[in-house]
Image: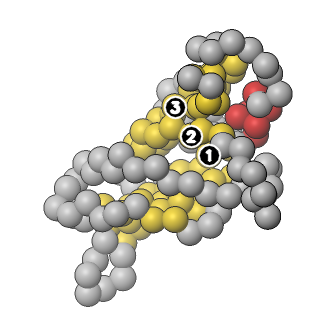
Amino acid sequence: MDGLGLLRIRKVKTRVEKDNCNPVWNEDLTILIKDINAHIILRVYDNDTFTGDDMMGEAEIDIKPLVECLKMDLPDRTQLARIEPSSANWLSKESYIMWNKGKLVQPMTLILGGGVECGELHLQIQWLHLLNAN
């Protein structure tokens, strides 16, 4: 299996991890978000050279809790919010939003859905303010 990750608001792809059933990408992907109510859709595919790629599963990220924490002006390493797994999100365990070295971050583990037997995505989202991001 050759793993490939895809983020959907704008199409952003990771590199392909060849012959690996448990791919680790360790990549930074940046997407411009214009609608804070939008969800980020992540899809994982088995990359096929000669036929269409097979979708292995998908998950969604709700960025509203992260955006709401932007308004809080608290010291570094402060935990701002805790999000519990529920039927309304794709979390497999609780996730914390915190300030870390001056950056607002949220590490999370998501359960892959969409017909996949098992699988999780471990990732961290971070809010960046971009100047003149028109």
Measured in 3D between alpha carbons, the distance from the residue under mark 1 to the one under mark 2, in whole angstroms, is: 9 Å
Which residue reaches farthest front? 131
16 above or below 82? below
- Mark 3 Cα within 10 Å, few/some/many (few <14, many 20+)? some
The front one of 31 and 91 is: 31
The amino acid on which the numbered mark 2 sits, given as a three-letter code, is: Ile
* Image location of residue 30, percent across then percent down: 56, 54
Query: What residue is disc 1 on?
Result: 61
Residue 125's disc number: 2
Q: Residue at x 75, y 51 (%)?
A: 131
The amino acid on which the numbered mark 3 sits, given as a three-letter code, is: Pro
Q: Residue at x 79, y 64 (%)?
A: 134
Mark 1 element type: strand
**Upstream in the sequence, badge 1 or badge 2?**
1
Query: What residue is disc 3 on?
Result: 107
- The answer to whether residue 32 is left or right of residue 46 is right
Q: Which of pointers 1 and 3 indicates the residue nearer the eye? A: 3
